[in-house]
Amino acid sequence: MTTPSETPRPGPRPAKQTFAAAGEDVDVMAISPVQEEGMLTDDRPASPFDDDIVAKARELAARYPQSRSALLPMLHLVQSVEGYVSQEGVAFCADQLGLSEAEVSAVVTFYTMYKRRPCGEHLVSVCTNTLCAALGGDAIYQRLQEHLGSDGKPLGHEEVAGTPGEPGSIMLEHAECLAACDLGPVLQVNYEYYDNQTPEKAVELVDALRRGEKPAPSRGAPLSDFKSVERQLAGFFPEDTDAFRADVDGPSQAVETLRGAQLAADRGWTAPALPDDVPLPEVEHK
Amino acid sequence: MSADPITPVLTKRWLSPQSWRLSTYEKLEGYTAIRKALAGTPEQLVQLVKDAGLRGRGGAGFPAGVKWSFMPPNEDKPHYLVINADEGEPGTCKDIPLMMADPHSLIEGCVIAAYAMRSHHCFIYVRGEALHCIRRLNAAVREAYEAGYLGKNILGSGFDLDITVHAGAGAYICGEETALLDSLEGRRGQPRLKPPFPAAAGLYAAPTTVNNVETIASVPFIVNGGADWFRQMGSEKSPGPKIFSISGHVERPGQYEAPLGTTLRELLELCGGMKDGIPLKFWTPGGSSTPLFTAEHLDVPLDFEGAAEAGSMLGTTAVQVFNETVSVPWAVMKWTQFYEHESCGKCTPCREGTYWLAQILERMVAGRGTEEDIDTLLDVCDNILGRSFCALGDGAVSPITSGIKYFRDEFLALCEDNRAKQELVGAQA
């Protein structure tokens, strides 16, 4: 009986093994299809995930009856560190949850919120679904593409203006319906809502972001950055109560949201009055 | 006695300052239903919800009490309650404002529903892009634990419940209940074959019920008011109030909670009519997956039966209103691109069909269509409808078939434009 060999894992190690087998006279770097830094050195690049992140990942896995359920939040956690899901991030989740990297990659590539390339300091998502588009969403997206593009080339979907991760850098994307249709056209910056937008307002907004300003959203917490909100999506909120409350109490009561309730209040319309003490129905005991 | 045009129940606390806080909720009758419910039996609560005729607010309209009664009475395996807060159907924008404004009503509903179904762990699966809701829910869950409304031995009743707020990651398909369960298990969100239904084998193959946010948030009111009170609003088969989300070319878009059975004509009166007086052309009664309506349908009662009889579906009561300036083929193309992007790829009719539908529509809108394309579209639709794994495929064909049914001329005009151009080219040659 033969011993099954270990499944090769992508990354520097198998690459090194492969090239080691090629013999000493082969210039492996010259024939390599990829030129990855540190490919032939012994140590993998230092893990970007420190002890605090490892502890958080374990906490996530413990939140669920079955640890695999923690994968989606854990990928948000990975993005909070790296600003995207790198191959190291995939390996990290696989390690934590006892999954193969293929299983994790399959999940990462399914969901649009996991970015496979480094995101900007901010992520700007413009709704271009039918209703927002008809109200001007397409024009907003097009205008931002042109405005954020360089060398006469418009910025594409999930491309970054500026250097990813640097202050003022922006990833632009067109998004599907953001569930704020009564406030359309809408866009989000780091998933905070900016309602009732126009191309001009949107340009002003991204210019402010590029200058390092953080204009307040119409609805949501004071604007932070992509990595910080990814930590919240992973389920980790500011430890400090006041900071958490400041986020939670960020505005939400848009005029549109309250219109029906306000109209009813103005006109004196109400639901039928709740009766007092209605008993629960009797049921036969089986 | 007929109800007022607007009947704020779910939305009645929204005007209060910091309506999302526990202190506000408690001042406004919050957490009173939970005491009454926990003093009763699970069977009584299931019966109450059946008597009230509460139907699922997520689009399908399945009777909630009946769904609850599918849960096994024993507890051989853990039972799970999962709240579908993955709001993403184009046009739909009711659950997100509800969770922002009044998260405790959802949590109180979860406690009651979980008790009725003998579940001790509830998951609220919130769409990832709805970050502010996720924050508010987390804060509300924290407050509820501290006040003893969640955790062990809730209010001394002996009933335990934990709630976990779980953020999605951007996939419309996860609003389909079995895809949601796969996603919650840490997998790609792809629907499962039914049966088995979630009540038999759901989350971790254990008995599970998936309910929409608005459905569960209605429960505390039903417990307090009783079935007869609830039935004073709406129609016989579709009782209760419903949040109508009116968007698009109207003067005052917004959230209007009205009895089920309200018509678009009445809703338009509430929201100030068509914007700038430009006439109505088409609208969706409940999101893009519900076949389009036109100005002929202003008086269709918007309840589950009324919308179905008129050839559409009630869906999520996401009323998207479009005026005469909007091209139907263009709107249909945009929606089709959405379904193409969101098709999970599991089944062939939907994966391939939406891809080809989008290609054809893009070509037509670009002025390079032919009359034959219309037949091809309908033929492809016919091969998706009822043949795909889940309702996404059915939803994808709704705008196309209804768009062609009511506005065939507009599709034809695209082709005729095309012919005219060809002739012009020919004349020059």
Image (cartoon, rainbow, N blue to C red):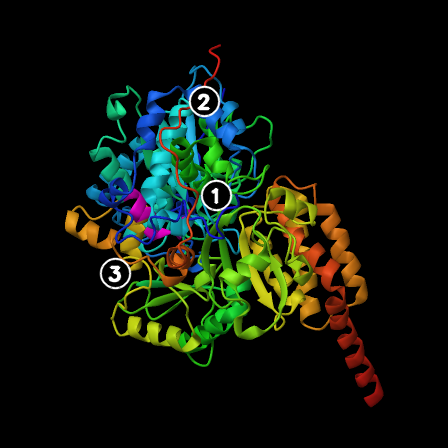
Residue B368: x %, y % from top left: 73, 71
| Three-letter residue code for mark 3 | Pro
Say which of marks 3 and 1 sits in front. Answer: 3
Q: Quadrant of residue B125?
A: top left
Say which of marks 2 and 3 sits in front. Answer: 2
In the image, which disc is placed on residue A281?
2
| Three-letter residue code for mark 1 | Ala
Share a chain, discs 2 and 3?
A: yes
Q: CA distance from mark 3 to mark 1?
A: 34 Å
Give the residue number, with chain letter if any, for mark 3. Answer: A222
Residue B142 sits above or below residue A283 on the image: below
* Residue extending farthest front: B1
Q: Is residue B135 magenta?
A: yes
In the image, which disc is placed on residue B279?
none
Say which of marks 2 and 1 sits in front. Answer: 2
Residue A63: x %, y % from top left: 30, 33
Inspect this view and state whether residue B71 appears: yes
Circle 1 SS class: helix
